[in-house]
Amino acid sequence: MGSGVAVRVVPGLVTAGGAFIGGSGAGFAQAASHTMAVAATHAARFSFDIFRAVISVVIRVVLRLYYAVLERIPGVMPHLFQIPRNALLRSPTLAEVSKGRDNNFNLLRFAAASMVIVYHESVIAPTPGSVEPVAWLTRGRDNGGSLAVLCFFIVSGFLVTQSFLGRSATLKGFLSARVLRIFPALWVAVPFTIIVSSFASPVPWGRYLTHPQTLRYWLHNSVLWDPVEFHLPGAFLHVPLARNVNGSLWTLPTEFRLYLVCVGLGILGLYTIRPVFNAFLLTVLLVAAMTRVESMPFVNNLTTAQWEFAFLSGMAFYVNRNEIRLNIPVALALLGSTYFVTDPGMGRIWIVPAMTYATLCFSLHPALFFRPFTRVGDYSYGLYIYAFPLQQQMVFYHPGISWLRGLALTYPIVLGVAFLSWHLIEKPALGLKRYFRPQPPAQPFPPAAGRPAEPLKNGQSPICSTIVA
């Protein structure tokens, strides 16, 4: 081959001398970059399809094993949920499964409240060499407490929107239901915390109760005055998480404010026109992305911004319930995808819609419905608001206790307190909602059998007429 002969390696593109036919070297680099980008996009889609297929295969294998066990042991778990064949791969719409009371919301909230307790225990009683389970699983990017709180706000946004749009809902009934759910147990938890914390304070009992800090704690936290108070005079001064008597209460003011936001959007009629609501939500997200979120209404910091995003996400899923299908492999794939989002800012954003879809799928998909848990009470709120001072008290009386041992000793006590709170305070308080529901108009009694109805005299009521007859 002579040195002066140009041999084309790729016909029509590159010669042996390195010249690009029809363009420059920069053009070749641009074309190569575009080709690589397209290839990467196809590779990502292909990887997602493979991941979804693997999840589907795993679920099918688990189902086969499940049925094999049930067939070999007749009558096992007769009262537990029975999963129909291929039910895990069905995709019902959110509107179809959100009617009625067949759901796992109680179970999910119970698990979320327990996750908060586990996380708080790891902070209240830190143990060298140990890591909170969710923090270990996510390589320190998240913890069980923050994910559980996101779950609470997602469920709350979905359910309060459903409650507001209920057939028999009125503004008075909606607000009374929210007040009766939040405040009665809170009005017990606040003095409960004051009394429990007094045993960890050197301040004499009389001065402790009349101290301005105690009165401020009682007043602010009883009405959810933001920010809530965390300190009581002299309480828990010599524990790892010093002076904090009930850190769980800090989410409640944001929660109650969002109830009022839900009312405001409902009064404006945004829920009834789906495109308008979606445009409003998109506008809010764009404004938040282009400005400092701390400058927006009702937002104190990035954490509360994420809570509110989760609440709005739950609302959006309910408003768009006819368009959203729940699929378990997709929910698992979305949860798995959050593990690969390493950028902190993007991770905070992406985890909300992914968790919203997964939370509602696990709560409402018929194949996952766990019926026995619907027969017990909703102990999640009690677990959430009573646990912290009891956990602090355990560390105060047992300095240096490991967080696993502290959790094992404290959790049964907290569960017992939550049980009493539900049956003695929360459930009776929720029973008062019937007094705020609209009453049907009174119907006149029918005429006596065998006698025609007589015309009413002036000023005579139907009831009097029947009695007189």
Image (cartoon, grey):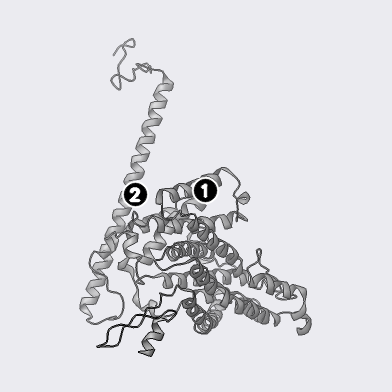
Q: Nearer the viewer, residue 348 or 405?
A: 348
Residue 187 is left or right of residue 177, and the answer is right
Q: In the rendering, which numbered label is found on residue 284?
A: 1
Quarter of the image with the N terminus in it: top left
Is 299 placed above or below 17 here? below
Of the 4 image quadrants, the one containing the C terminus is bottom left
- Label 2: which residue? 48
**Within-10-Å neighbours for mark 2: few <14, some 14–19, many 20+:** some
Q: In terms of secondary structure, where does tag 1 sit?
A: helix
Q: Is residue 254 visible?
A: yes
Q: In terms of depth relative to the viewer, which is nearer, 449 or 249? A: 449
Task: Identify the amino acid type marked 1.
Answer: Val
Q: Is residue 246 left or right of residue 138?
A: right
State yes or no: discs 2 and 1 in contact (Cβ < 8 Å): no
Q: Amino acid at mark 2?
A: Phe
Spatial CA span between label 2 and label 1: 30 Å
Name the element at disc 2: helix
Give residue 260's quadrant in the image: bottom right
Q: Is residue 425 left or right of residue 18?
A: right
Give residue 15's position: percent from left, percent from top: 33, 17
Instruction: Provide residue 217's location: percent of width, then percent of height.
Output: 69, 72
Question: Left or right: 67 with respect to 139?
Answer: left
